[in-house]
Amino acid sequence: MQFSEQWLRSWVNPALNSDELAHLLTMAGLEVEENEAAAPAFSDVFVAEVLSVTKHPDADRLNVCSVNVGEAEPLQIVCGAPNVAAGLKVPCARIGAVLPGNFKIKKAKVRGIESSGMLCSGDEMGIASDIDGLYVLPSDAPVGMSIREYLALDDRLLTLKLTPNRTDCLSIRGIAREVAALTKSSLSPVVIETAAMSTDAAITVALNAEAACPRYAGRLIQGINQAATTPDWMKQRLERSGIRSISAIVDITNYVLLELGQPMHAFDAAKLSGGVQVRFAKAGESITLLNEKELMLTDDLLVIADDHEVLALAGIMGGLASSVTESTQDIFLESAFFAPEVIAGKARRFGFSSDSSHRFERGIDFGNVREALERATQLVVEICGGQVGPVTEQLTTLPARLPVALRVSRVAKVLGISLPAAEIMAMLQGLGLVCELAADVITVTPPSYRFDIEIEEDLIEEVARVFGYDNIPVSPSLARMSMLPQAGDRRSKNVLKSILASRNYQETISYAFVEEKWETDFAANSAPIRLMNPIASQMSVMRSTLIGGLVAGLQHNLNRKQDRVRLFEVARCLSRRCGTSTTRTNCCVSMGPSFCRAMGCSERTC
């Protein structure tokens, strides 16, 4: 997951710099794969207002502009951008500015006209822009303000490489919760208020697959302004999370996905027939998704449908026919919890993935469904207006969060450090876990967003993460040790390898999976151990001899004109005995079995 560091710091702001924060997250099990700047370094670029534009007397494509950059007198700047116009707010690089690529702005004459600076495009500042020409700023941008400060370009983009069990950290709220617990910093979540209803209009919801979808909530919002534009702050956060802005309604659902971790979808209410139902698809049904893929559905696919047709592939992607468009006036917002095992693997079956399926198939917070719907409603009303209807919700049996017992003595034994029970409880409570202490045992009830806490070892791992792996002291192991008898007529593998290496032999390591015909040719093995799911067609059986890999290595070298080749390999082989497979160690060298016996190898030789 990619996100803006400044967005995270609006939730929790520890006294750590960007590198320290990345190290903290990595050591807590949330590996920071990338930590890069939101924009390249440049200086002395400010918000400016174009006061007037006149044609250059000696160049058809150039204009002479009078530009206010917040100084006593406006600057005269020659500009060739096609979109320059009086009244625009644009970035201006003053004399002395250094743009990306070490491009220095100097006072110059352009076709005989003096130019004291440069009006900038997005490309010239090293930031993405879909505008052909100057980077146009909002009309309320303060003239004279540093463009880096105005556009928050000193931000960092962090990308987390999360393990599948940490879906709770696929959101800003989840990551902020972790950082707050790890640094003991205060958490400042967004304030989510329940929307005031202004209409009684609603769309009914029915659950016809209760085990697959135990919770589904929806709300009708009428009379929205679909022409409303997405605020710049929201666009910026989406873009820095790797999601492009599409339209206000779609952007809001994507924003809630990133902020709270709850996938959402908006239907055009005018395109719905009757109520909404959650069910499994019927044979012969089809749907065209938002990515314009047309799918024939099978009865193991969970869908959202109305009285006449399938509207969406549940937990994966909405349908094109019921999608929000520029003419949409009424929307039906949905927020749901789908069982992970029902969604898992379905998107990959059709050759694509989505942010929603990535989360649903790992398990999301089923306690967040209603809250996310209220948050999305809040943003829709703020940005697009509209009349809010009541929430229609269906709720059945949700997954159980069973208490897990944690022994304080067990923590000390596993981690090698003694921690007081009160300190352990404080660590776990900081992560949002409900704890009760009785004697030496802390009973912990996982919250709805922690699917991964099921056994005592899971809790010990949480204690280690919050305490800090770096803070666990390294102590030598204590054990009773005794010398084991060693046969005088045998040599160890290491001794054998050393002898071979001293005679200019090279050790090879080959796959234990080999081609079936090798077993027939080299081992006269007509019934090798077959793999149920081979990684390649030529690696379909387990080897019962090492000679095949050595011959392949020899051939590889000879094909490349390397004729002085001495190879050996010490590895395991597998063969059948009485219908079962057994493992033994084999040694094979190109000098043959007599050499192995001379080295004292009493194992079966090749």
Image (cartoon, rainbow, N blue to C red):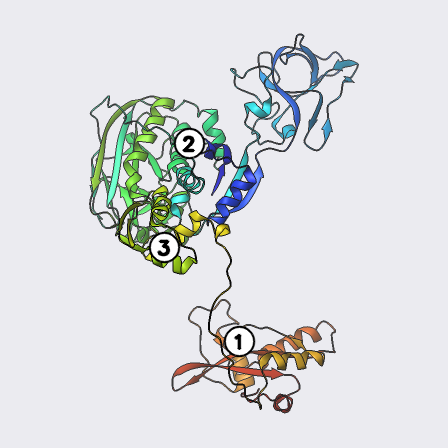
Q: Is residue 240 visible?
A: no
Between residue 510 and residue 153, name the one nearer to us. Answer: 153
Q: Nearer the viewer, residue 375 or 482?
A: 482
- Dot placed on the residue nearer the N-terminal end, 1 or 2: 2
* Above/below status of 136 relative to 570: above
Q: Which residue is pictured at 52% across the width and 15% down the height?
A: 139
Q: Which residue is mark 1?
A: 515
Name which quarter of the figure residue 416 lies in.
bottom left
> Horizontally, is 215 left or right of 375 in the view?
left
The residue beneath circle 2 is: 251
* Residue 578 coordinates in the image, percent (x, y): 38, 87
Q: Nearer the viewer, mark 3 or mark 2?
A: 3
| Above or below, 452 relative to 378 | below
Residue at mark 1 to residue at mark 2: CA–CA distance: 52 Å
> Picture quarter containing residue 52?
top right
Q: Amino acid at mark 1?
A: Glu
- In the rendered image, the vertical position of residue 56 relative to residue 481, given as above or below: above
Q: In this figure, which residue is indicated by the disc labeled 3? A: 458
Q: Is residue 234 above or below residue 551?
A: above
Please tell me whether mark 2 sits on a helix, a strand or a loop. helix
Residue 483 is tagged as none
Image point (38%, 54%), residue name: 460
* Front label number (3 vs 1): 3
Count of labels shown?
A: 3
Q: Position of residue 337 (x, y in %)?
A: 29, 44
Q: CA distance from mark 3 to mark 2?
A: 36 Å
